[in-house]
Amino acid sequence: MAPEARALAWHSAEATGGAACTFGGSGMTQLGYRFALDFYPLLIVLTIRGMDRPVRWWHVALILDSVSANAWGVWVLSCLEIGRLF
């Protein structure tokens, strides 16, 4: 990734994330911050580009840990059967 593209991705993620943090809503019963989905694609690209080649075992372990934590959260919320808070 070119340095200009990397800088543009960082500034875009910061601007979008900063604007999203000014809103007080949490996304109700969702796992995680709902409005973070606006800047996650930029952070994913930066994360992938920042990893060493070849991908190390601990990269894979951290990615699998993140996926399992989110899967657990979705499972817990589905077991609680919370449709709406209000």
Image (tube, rainbow, N blue to C red):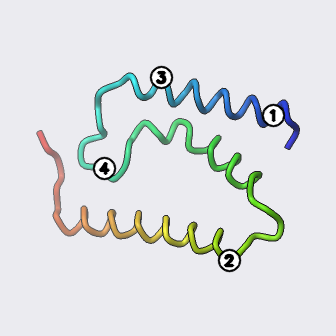
At 78% from the left and 37% from the top, the residue drawn is 6
Answer few, some or many: residues within 10 Å of disc 2's Cα (few below 14, many 20 plus, some between 14 and 19). few
Name the amino acid type tagged 2. Answer: Trp
Work out whether mark 4 precedes mark 3 in sequence or the reverse, and give the earlier one: 3
Work out whether mark 2 precedes mark 4 in sequence or the reverse, and give the earlier one: 4
Q: In the image, 13: left or right of 34?
A: right
**Label disc, if present, on residue 57 of the rendered structure:** 2
The Cα–Cα distance between marks 4 and 3, rounded to whole angstroms, is 20 Å
Looking at the picture, does residue 40 appear above or below residue 48? above
Name the amino acid type tagged 1. Answer: Ala
Disc 1 versus disc 2: nearer the observer = 2
Work out whether mark 1 precedes mark 2 in sequence or the reverse, and give the earlier one: 1
The Cα–Cα distance between marks 2 and 4, rounded to whole angstroms, is 30 Å
**Label 4, on which residue?**
30
Q: Secondary structure at mark 3?
A: helix
Q: Secondary structure at mark 2?
A: helix
The Cα–Cα distance between marks 3 and 2, rounded to whole angstroms, is 35 Å
**Label 1, on which residue?**
5
Work out whether mark 4 precedes mark 1 in sequence or the reverse, and give the earlier one: 1
